[in-house]
Amino acid sequence: MALLTAHDLIQLALEISTTHFCKIAAMGVTIELQNLGDAELCREIAVGIERALSEKTGDWRVSIAGSRATENWDTRVEGPNGFERSYTLSGAAGQHGPETIRKMILQLVSS
């Protein structure tokens, strides 16, 4: 049996899951996406997060939760040595794009 890459695991988990909640765990990165509404968007966001954290050591957990009441997404990043950051992504400000989220994750973990 061939070994799956982190990207393969993300693809598989997203294909199996519904668009309401997806949890992916691969290579020290756990990604939880909830209520984002679009499977393809979730796939692209997960790949971007995995890329952003691929060179970081330790275990990382990223959760993004959409809200039915507002257009904001609550984001939380947890990492080694008690690292914790929270951020609100605004749809009105164009912050729901996969590349924007990847860059935001990079900024959060670099600070």
Image (cartoon, rainbow, N blue to C red):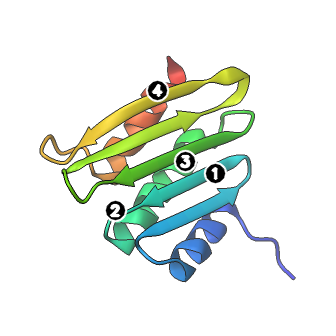
Distance of label 4 from label 3 (alpha carbons): 14 Å
Distance of label 2 from label 3 (alpha carbons): 20 Å
Disc 1 is placed on an element classified as strand
Residue 36 is tagged as: 2
Classed neighbour count for the residue bearing mark 3: other residues with Cα under 10 Å, few (<14), some (14–19), many (≥20): some
Q: Verify CB contact (< 8 Å) between mark 4 and mark 3.
A: no
Going by the numbered disc 3, the residue's amino acid type is: Arg
Disc 2 is placed on an element classified as loop
Q: Verify CB contact (< 8 Å) between mark 1 and mark 4.
A: no
Going by the numbered disc 2, the residue's amino acid type is: Leu
Residue 44 at what x, y percent from top left?
41, 62
Going by the numbered disc 1, the residue's amino acid type is: Thr
Nearer the observer: mark 2 or 3; the answer is: 2
Sequence-wise first label, 4 or 2: 2
Sequence-wise first label, 4 or 3: 3
Distance of label 2 from label 1 (alpha carbons): 17 Å
Residue 108 is tagged as: 4
Distance of label 1 from label 3 (alpha carbons): 13 Å
Residue 71 at what x, y percent from top left?
19, 51
Q: Verify CB contact (< 8 Å) between mark 1 and mark 3.
A: no
Residue on which disc 3 sits: 51
Residue 30 is tagged as: 1
Sequence-wise first label, 2 or 3: 2
